[in-house]
């Protein structure tokens, strides 16, 4: 289930739409994933679980726009998902109450190597300036 959610934000940012299979989609609205889906809805329409799938797309097939996102609860998966999507969004995205776990910091380091512009490592507020394109990188 986590992999399905983690691909949602980056795929929407890159291609403008995404359909992800999620066996537990019906439970997502009631579970810890709710805040991730709510945050995704600020950017993309239709990000609702339905019949075992989550479908989402950017309005008018455009590019995600920067946003100010405040997480109700600290969530590593939510922070990673929105962070990855924000790297390709147009403008600046601010994430507040973001997770500060080592895996989030490691993801920030990888995204920077790929060309992302991110500030605020190891703090609960991350600022992401979207870039048009990311490139490959080696990371360990």
Image (cartoon, rainbow, N blue to C red):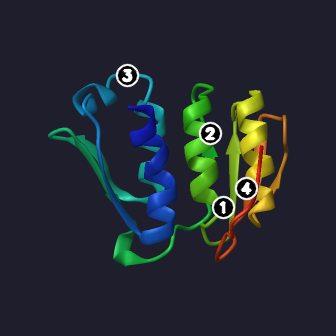
Helix, strand or loop at mark 1: loop
Q: Residue at x 71, y 33 (%)?
A: 103
Helix, strand or loop at mark 3: loop
State which tag comes first along the sequence, 2 or 3. 3
What's the mark number on residue 111? Answer: 4
Residue 132 found in image quarter: bottom right
Mark 3 vs mark 1: in front:
1
Q: CA distance from mark 3 to mark 1?
A: 26 Å
Query: Relative to the observer, which residue lies in front, 82 or 140?
Result: 140
Callout 3: 10 Å neighbours few (<14), some, many (20+)? Answer: few
**What residue sits right under mark 1 in the picture?**
87
Q: CA distance from mark 1 to mark 2?
A: 12 Å
Mark 4 vs mark 2: in front:
4
Considering the image in quadrants, where does the C terminus appear?
top right
Q: Residue at x 52, y 57 (%)?
A: 10
Residue 126 lies, with reference to residue 78, above or below; the image says below
Q: Residue at x 81, y 49 (%)?
A: 109
Q: Position of residue 108 (x, y in %)?
A: 76, 47
- Judged left or right of residue 1, residue 120 is right
User: Does the residue at mark 4 contact the one at mark 1 (Cβ under 8 Å)?
Assistant: yes
Q: Position of residue 32 (x, y in %)?
A: 44, 23
**What residue sits right under mark 2 in the picture?**
79
Q: Position of residue 128 (x, y in %)?
A: 74, 58
**What residue sits right under mark 3 in the picture?**
31
């Amino acid at each position: 289930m986590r992999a399905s959610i983690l691909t949602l934000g980056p795929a929407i940012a890159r291609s403008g739409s995404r359909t992800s299979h999620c066996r537990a989609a019906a439970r997502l609205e009631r579970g810890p994933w709710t805040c991730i889906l709510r945050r995704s809805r600020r950017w993309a329409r239709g990000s609702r679980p339905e019949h075992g799938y989550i479908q989402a797309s950017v309005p008018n097939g455009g590019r995600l726009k920067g946003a100010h996102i405040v997480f109700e609860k600290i969530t590593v998966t939510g922070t990673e998902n929105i962070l990855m999507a924000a790297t390709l969004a147009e403008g600046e995205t601010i994430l507040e109450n973001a997770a500060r776990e080592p895996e989030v910091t490691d993801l920030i380091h990888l995204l920077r190597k790929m060309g992302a512009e991110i500030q605020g490592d190891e703090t609960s507020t991350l600022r992401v300036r979207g870039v048009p394109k990311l490139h490959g990188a080696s990371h360990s």
